[in-house]
Amino acid sequence: MCSSTNTYVPYSMRLQKITQEAPGVKTFRLEFIDPADAARFSFKTGQFAEYSVFGEGESTFCIASPHTRTGYVECTFRQAGRVTTALSGLEEGDVVGFRGPYGNTFPIDDWKGKNLVFVAGGIALPPMRSVIWSCIDNRADYKNITIVYGAKTVDDLVYKHELDEWEQREDINLHLTVDPGGSTPDWKGRVGFVPTILAEVAPSSENTIAIVCGPPIMIKNTMPVLKQLGFSEEHIFTTLENRMKCGIGKCGRCNIGSTYVCKDGPVFTAAQLAQLPNEF
Amino acid sequence: MPILVKLLQRTSYNSLIEKLLDEFQVYAPVKKGKQVLYERIRAVHDMETDYLLPVLSAKSLVFPPVETLFTFERKKEGVDVLPVAVENLPERVLLGVRPCDARGIAILRQTFAQEPVDAIFEARFNKTILIGLSCATADEACFCGNRAGDTTGSDILLTQVSNGDYLAEIITEKGQRLVERHADLFETPTELPDKAAFVATVRGLDNVENLPALLKAAFDSKVFDQQSLACIGCGTCTYVCPVCSCFDMQDETQGSKGRRVRCWDSCGFSCFTVHTSGHNPRETQGQRWRQRVMHKFSYLPESNHTFGCVGCGRCIRSCPVKLDISQLINQIAHV
Amino acid sequence: MNTLHTLSRQQLELGAQVIIGYTPGSNGTSGTSRPPKPFFAQSPEEVEQLIFDDTCHYNLAVYLTKKEVTALGKRVLFATLPTLRSIIRLAVEHQVNEGDVAVIVRANDTEYALLNTLAEMETFLNGRTPAMSQEDREQLDALLAMNQEERWAFWKEAFETCIRCYACRQACPLCYCATCAATANQPQWIPVAQHALGNTEWHLMRAMHLAGRCITCGQCGEACPMGLPVHLLAFYLAETVQHEYGAASGLTLTETTPMSVYKPEDTTNFIR
C-alpha cells in the first residue's frame, strides 16, 4: 500500500526467498502482496528503498535486483543493528514493509555504446549487481564489461552463484580477489586489495565509464588508480551511503551541504562528490 | 491576493474569539506557571495578553513533537497496516501568533510540501488558521531584522494601535473567508493609522546579504570548534526553533499492535548522523554546530532562497549555557 | 579581579591549555541581566574576559567529560562548591584523574585560591557543604506533603510538558555515559518519542541512575527550557540515600557508590 495519500506507509511484501550469501549476509526476494501494487510499481537501477520490520523500524538498502526483471525486488544486507537483526530473524512467508523507490539512478542509457568497468568491495556489490544485470540484460547495448570485485575472505564474497555465471560468460571480464590472508587452498582467483588488482587489470579509460562502490577506505584508494588510468571525474560514478530515516529529503539527516543523499543521490559522479563539503 | 486592511475594535476581537470558540479548536498564548505557551483555550480570558513570545514556537500545531504515521497489527497471516485518517483532523485557529512564528511555519511548509508531499503536515496546515499579532516591543534576544510586523505566514495579521483597537490585515484567502463569516465585527477604517508607528524596530544579523557566501568560505575555519566548546549538545535550540524540522522515525508496539511515529530530533545530538558501522560524519560538536549554522544561513538560502532562521531569539533565551547564536554568527561572518 | 586574572594567566604560562570560567552574559529579556555564561579562555587576552563572583553558579564540571574539551589538554576550572563535589564524585567514578584538572575557588568574598590536587579539593570542601536553596527546600517539602495522587498529578503535568531535549542530561556533570540508556536501541529501554509515557520513563530512569551519585547542584532543573523542576527528583533520591545509608555524594575521595556496591555485612535483608 505505498499510499499516494500517505507517503510514509510502506508496501506490504511477502518474503519469498532467503539466500545466505556470506556469514551475516542475506539476500531477500520480496513480492508484492497486493497485485495492484505490483502492477503500478517500477524503479530504475541505482534507486534504494526503506525496508521495514513492523515493530522494529526501517533500514535503508539499495534495490539489488535489476529493473529489467519485474514481479519482485531483492535486497542484500548484513546483520549489524536493530532492524537488520530483526530482518535476519524472519522466515520465508513473513511480511516485510517496502517504501520506495527513492533516489536518483545510474544513467545507463547514457552509457550505451561505451565500455563499463565495475569496481566493488564486499557488501558493496549489491548496488553494483543491480546495474550489472540491468546492463547484461541488454548486453548488446554496451561494449566491454569488466568487473573487479573483492572481499575480505572467500566466504565474504556475495552472490557466489552469479559470480560463477559471470565467470563463464565470454562477454564479461571478471576479476575476483580476496584480501591478503583471505584465500582458501582451492581459491582460483587473485589475492590482493581491490585497488591493487584494479591497477593490475588496468582497464583502458578510452570511451569507458567506471562505477565504484565500496567501504570508504576502498573508494579512497581506488580513485587515484582510476585517475592514473586516465578516467575523468565526470566518468566515475559511485553510490553513497549515509544515515537515513525518511528517504525523501525531509528528516534532515542524510544531507551533505545542501545535497540530500536520498533525493539528489545516492548516485553521484566523482566530480559531484568533489563539490560537496568534506563531511561524509 | 492584495492585502485588505480592516479595523477590529478591541471589544470586537473578544467577540470574534468567542465566536471562534464555537466553531473551531482555538489555541492562543496561555500562562503556565512562569512560562507562556501556545495552548488550547476554552474561554477568552484563558488567553494571555502580557507576553513577548511563548517559550515554544507555533510549529507544534503543524509539526507536533510526536505524530503517528500509521498503525499496524501483526497477525498470523501477515500485517494489517492502517494509515492515519488525515481527513478527520479538527480545524483550528491560532491566535496571537508572533510574525516570526508565522513566518517559521511558512518556511517549514517548503520542506514538507516538496514532492513527495507530506500529506499529514499539509492536512494540519490546511486546517489551521493563523491570526498573527505584530510586536510592539522586542527584547535584546530578538533579531528578526525589523520584521515585527511582517505578514508572511499569517492569514490575518493584527497590529494593536494607540486606542487598543487592532489594524487587521487580511492576507490569504483562508483569512478572507474567516473575515467574511464575521463581517459585522470588521470595520472599514476611514483613516488608516500608520502601522509602522506601532511596530517595534528590531536588530538583525550583520551583513545578511553576504552571509551565505561568507559562511561557505569559512567552512574549514577553526572558529566552529572554538565557538562550540561551551555547547553541551542538547536539543534545546532545535526544539524551541520555529523552523527546525529534523525528525526521527520510531516503531512502538504493545503486544501485536503498534504504530510508527515521526518525532522531533536534533542535528546537535552526537548520534544524529552515526552509521550502524560506528562511522560518524559529524563526530565533534564543532562539526554539528557548523552544520546548524551552514544549514540555516548558507545551504537553505542556496536551495530554497530563504534563511532557515526568523530571528525570534528563542535559541538565545533558552540555551542552558547562554550561547548567543546571533553574536556567534556575526563573529563568523567577520572571520 | 586582579588575583583571578593573574592566577589564570599564571596557569596558562605553567602549561594549562584552557581556563574554563565565566564571562558576563549579554543583556537579558525585559531589561533583566542574564546570568554569566561558561567561557573558555585559551590566551592572556581571553583571560581578561573572565569573571567569578556571586552571580556565577553554572556547574562547569560538565565540561570535564566532554571530549572536545579534554582533548585540549590540562584544564583549570572555576569551581563553586557544587562543582568541587562533582569533581570528587567524577574522581571516585574514575572519570577524572589526578593531574587532569586544577581549580580556582573563591576562598572568600574577595580572594581566590588555586587548588592543584584532588586532595586539596577534598580538604577545601570540608565543612563547606552547601545546603539546598530555600526555594528548592520549600518546593520539595511541598511535594512531600502532598498525597500520592496530588504528587502524581504534579509530575504527570511536568512530564507531559517535557520536550525531551535532554538539556537535563547534557547539563549534568554525572551524566557522561558514552551511550546513554535512552539512546541504546538493542534493546530499546525507553521510547524515543517525546510523549508522556516516554518522558515519564526518561525522568524516572535518570533519577534512578543518579541515586546515590547526584551532588544536588540543581543544574538539570536550571537547564530545562520548559522550567520543569526535574532536579527535585534527584534531590529527593539524594536525601533518601543519605537518610537510609548515611552516604552523601561528592565529599570524600574514598567514598563508594551506595547503589552499586554490595557487601555481605549490609544490614538490608531484602537481597538475602
Image (cartoon, coloured by chain):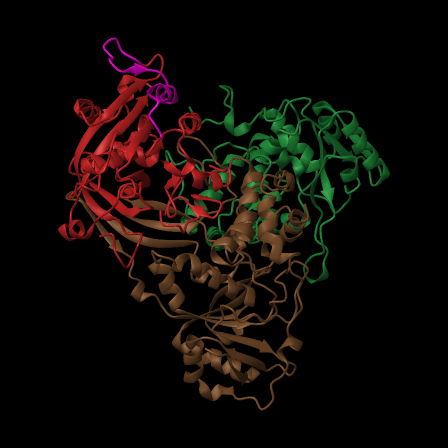
Depth order, front residue of B243/B256: B243
Q: Residue B296 location, x and y as percent? A: 54, 52
Residue C168 seen by the camera? no
Residue C108 seen by the camera? yes
Q: Quadrant of residue A154?
A: top left
Asked if residue B229 is positioned above or below residue A204 in the image, the reply reads below
Residue for point 78% across, 28% down: C11
Q: Residue C67 location, x and y as percent? A: 58, 31
Q: Residue C165 location, x and y as percent? A: 51, 47
Which quarter of the image is occupied by the C terminus of chain C?
A: top left
Extent of the magenta region: A183-205
Depth order, front residue of A173/A35: A173
Q: Quadrant of residue A239?
A: top left
Q: Residue B207 location, x and y as percent? A: 65, 56
Chain B: drawing colour: brown
Q: Give the left or right position of residue C86, taking residue B88 as reference.
A: right
Residue for point 51% across, 53% down: B302
Report the chain shown in red.
A
List the single residue furthest toward the bottom.
Answer: B190
